[in-house]
Image (cartoon, rainbow, N blue to C red):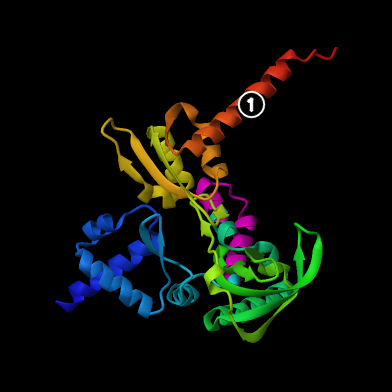
Amino acid sequence: MRHDHLKRELDLLLLLAQNRLLSTADICRRTGISLRSFYYYIDFFEQAGFRVEKHHGMYSIDRTSPFFMRLGEIIHFTEDEALLMRQLIDCSGDETPRLRDLKAKLERFYDFKILADEQLRERTAHVRSVIYEAVKLRHVVELRGYSSPSSHTVSDRRVEPFQFLGNGNDVRCYESATGLSKTFRISRMADAVDTGEQWQHADKHRQAYIDLFSFTGEDTMHITLRMGQLSHNLMLEEYPASAGCFSMAADGRWIFQADVCSYLGIGRFVLGLYDDIEILGDDGLKQYVTGKLQQWHTCLSSSLAAPKQQ
């Protein structure tokens, strides 16, 4: 029946929107579709305007595709609602774990420095709207008065915007002057003007990925860990979205697999629970953790060897 096909299409769409781990064969097995149907659906999704990506042999759908952006506008909290919830939490004086988790979740998705400043909020909303339309039309935008903390300059930048990040607080753009894809913070723009010019460098656009630990990068590293019950439970508590990254190992422990943009997030977790986690891959993570342990050992040795102050 048609509704059965529709259910499989929706299941596939949701799976692709969060996929960073599953191969094409895994996806077909989970959704109960054939490989031929899978490629048919991929073609249909692309024709419908979804941005389909292939990364390390795995297919996924960019969550900044227009459909998801429109859906998000309908179901997510407005900025006024988010600000009100934050104020109510602050005024409650209650520091229960549940309220702390809610506050942390809100802060991951909303920039409250912007929300608390009405003038800045209006300017940011205008800039975001201009850039959003430019992305849809594939237009060049002039970012006016962009304040760059890295170069300590305020200047106008001509860019090709193509990907929103961080719940719309950042935008990924190609800058022809430097020949690089960069991430720009919308709140640092004095204004944005759609020039009406079409993109000229779409083949040079380099999308950024956001990993489980909120780090961003153009490239990802695939890591594999074997975790005990303690580290498994803490990972789920700190990062609920990690649930899909686990599978049960034969020895009763857990295998964790994920793509990360930086070793900082996962490295912090591994170092804090080193006796409950085994790094199975990749070599880069092993070297990162080994280097951190050596630094810590050197600092500790120096501290013990230093003469005590009388």
Task: Please identify the dominant SS of the magenta region.
Answer: helix
* Image position, residue 62 (x, y; %): 44, 67
Q: Taking 75 as reference, is 181 above or below it? A: above
Q: Give the range drawn in magenta.
A: 80-103
Task: Please state the horizontal and vertical placement of residue 16, each as a whole percent of the image.
Answer: 36, 63
Residue sticking out furthest to the left: 1
Residue 303 position (above or below residue 108): above
Name the residue type under label 1: Trp
Q: Where is residue 257 in the image (x, y as percent from the top left)?
A: 39, 44
Q: Name the residue under label 1.
A: 296
Name the residue at 28% across, 66% down. 11
Can residue 87 be spotted in the picture?
yes
Q: Where is residue 87 in the image (x, y as percent from the top left)?
A: 64, 62
In the rendered image, which quarter is residue 302 located in? Answer: top right
Q: Which residue lies at the image location 22% right of the left edge and 57% below the top edge?
A: 29
Residue 74 relative to residue 31: left or right:
right
Near mark 1 (Cα within 10 A), the count class, few <14, some 14-19 or many ≥20, is: few
Name the quadrant of the N terminus.
bottom left
Nearest the camera: 289 or 125? 289
